[in-house]
Image: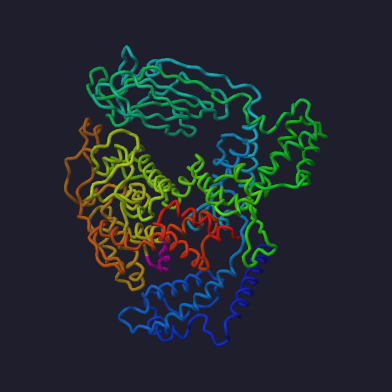
Amino acid sequence: MSPRHFLHQSKRVAVVAALAVSLCGVAAHADPFGKTFIQDHCSDCHADGMKKGGFTFDKLGTDLTDAETMRRWVLVHDRVAKGEMPPKKEPRPAKAEQAAFLASLTDTLTKADDAQREVVLRRLNRTEYENTIRDLLGVNVELKGMLPEEVSAHGFDNVGEALATSEALIQGYLEAADAAIDAALGPAKQPEHIALRYPLSKDATNAMFRQTDAGVVLFSTGYCPSTVRQLRIRHDEKLTYRVRIHARAFQSDTPVVMSVHAGDVIVHRRPFFLVGYWDLKPGDMNVVEFTVRLGKGDTLHPMPYGTIGRPKDANTYDGPGIEIGDVEVEGPLEAWPPPSRAALLGDVDPAKGTLDDAKRIVARLLPRAFRRDTKPDEVEPYAALMKAALDDGRPFLDAVRLGVKAVLVSPEFLFLDEPTRTKAAKASGAEIDDFAVASRLSYFLWSSMPDAALLDAARSGRLREPGAMAAQVERMLKDAKAAAFVENFVGQWLDQRNIDFTEPDKKLYPEFDEALKEAMLGETRAYFARMLREDRSVLEFIDSDWTVVNERLAQLYGIDGVTGTTLRVVDLPKDSLRGGVLTQASVLKVTANGTNTSPVLRGVWVLDNILGEPAPPPPPGIPAVEPDIRGATTLRQQLDQHRNSERCATCHAKIDPPGFALESFDPIGGYRTWYRSLGEGEKLDVYANEAARHAHVRVAYRKGLPVDCTGELPGSGPFEGIRDLKAMLMKQPDRITRCVTRKLMVYALGRGDGFSDRPEIERIVAANAAQGHGLRTLVHQIVESPTFRQP
């Protein structure tokens, strides 16, 4: 038996023993699994060979250390608690009998969950690592790409049980530490300063451009070789430059949009990225100013957006374009030597540095790196490394680098150690110490280390004073670093990070492009940020009378009166289907496959992310339902046959209804009453955009079969579409609040929630309801919950 397998078995034996001891507390005549109740009310359909709905008690054991066994017993508990079982057509158990069964099973499951819970030492994920380096050393350096991507658990990538280590990860940390120290110390020589101003017409000389006295006119949204080739950056590291582009709308009475990309936009051997979109007004030159980080070989690529594909003759074409005059580039803007160098070295002159100087540098770094007070002797292992380097004749800075690098790859830096204030981690009422609370709070709201104010509050014991945590939460949410909470929590809860997982079929959805995708993501982040900032009700995740759009997204939504690229809050018409996250284009895109929608995929997503009731995995041997891309049948028609199987019917009765209601929306979030088809259906005399109209290219898709968005929500009744479904869900506020609470708690604590967490979650849900369901209030209630301080 391997040591790893032996350790796993040992832990399993210990958990089983702990569970056995905990169950011994039940009286000898008690029925911890409610087998009498099951025999009287469930066995006719789910025992003695009967497997109605694909479920039977015949082979359901009582070893709750087995995850699937635990899941099934929790399912039994929940279905009985909700009144779903026994079915309504069957004789109902007496209330007292049902209450006794639930009380006994609740006690059993709670004790089992408590016995199995292990305190997992949580590692910083890639985002947290990069942010922590930024705040520790005062540098802005890209490190995530050097580290392997994390595996998510319970929907988030900061959950300890999934944050494993590997040889590749350790190698990545070593490389990332070198890059971080390089950035902190800065280059040996001052990077060449660039102060460039020249007309883009010197670079944009292609015949597809029109030369003017003021500059050069670009018309093409597609191929447009208008890169800034005069910009030559020679330093390897990414540094900050200020850019000003003088440009205006051309041959247009209304603004024309300019996009700018940066990076390796010429050769495309390395990544390039979108800087942004700007509305250029006609008349005088607009000055578009921004900062961007650039390194060796990087440059800029301005071009029009939303114009035509390519004019036949740029000199005679009379359509809209953009006229660009001068381009200014100044930088690097960072001081040299960088302030981070002095912050790390202090007043030590590297040319005269001694071992004592090196020890003071590392000793000063340790408390912030370890996010707690340190003892004097904790510097000694790092001092030994630096002494060996100096004894070998290596330069002082090399020795310091070695010591700092060892700190940055140490377990104390890479892992969030959470020691308890009592000796026994499992002791009743045990709490993690105040420094661990400070770290838990900062990685929850900032995805980074605690700042000086938070560490000082932990050191002095003030975090345990009444109102102290609330004050810290308010202070931290007002800080710019709280943007990480919005981006990382929303990005995972609502699967925004998967926006590029599929690419919409260009023939079916030619209107989808990068600008629309960016607007989609921007809407969802800005929506959550406003709800958090204004403490709006979590029920507005289901429905609201407002949303956040720009012109491009408003066009998709059919909202009039919105112009420009800037996202802004708009009031929705009373009959609008938008409002809430369910009908936001970003959510509708990540729950589709790019070509078709699936009521099953969207239904499963809603159950998990909005209702907090994940669907069980499909039974073995049941094939997935594949859409008919030719348009001869709808997926709903195929699902009707799929649900004829008794093994599938029970789960699909819950999964399919939300998905059916969302069938009114296509894979890019547009409203529809019929499906687009590449085979069957009526030909259309429609152009996807202005460029297609100019080229006389009509859409390739056809008008396919009609959409059926009706259904029946269990416990609520039939609905005609998404508007009815939203109204039904709005009448279940605790269900929605419970889901958001669970998601926030998993993200805040870095661990999955279990059955034993339910009482505290229910307490928070009730307290939040009493205070109006506010999202910001909910964040406060989670932070001030006893669970937040528990191991």
Percent x, y of residue 759? 49, 67
Give the image's coloring scheme: rainbow
- The quadrant of the image that shows the C terminus is bottom right
201 w.r.t. 99: above or below: above
85 w.r.t. 335: above or below: below
Percent x, y of residue 515? 35, 37
Closest to the observer, 206 or 559? 559
Percent x, y of residue 95? 39, 82
Q: Please, which residue is most extreme toward the right here?
A: 391
Percent x, y of residue 339? 62, 29
Segment tinted magenta in the rendering: 612-622
- The quadrant of the image that shows the N terminus is bottom right
Give the residue displayed 25% in from the left and 32% down from the top: 691
Closest to the observer, 278 or 227? 278
Q: Quadrant of residue 786?
A: bottom right
For this view, does 601 lie left or right of residue 756? left
144 w.r.t. 161: above or below: above
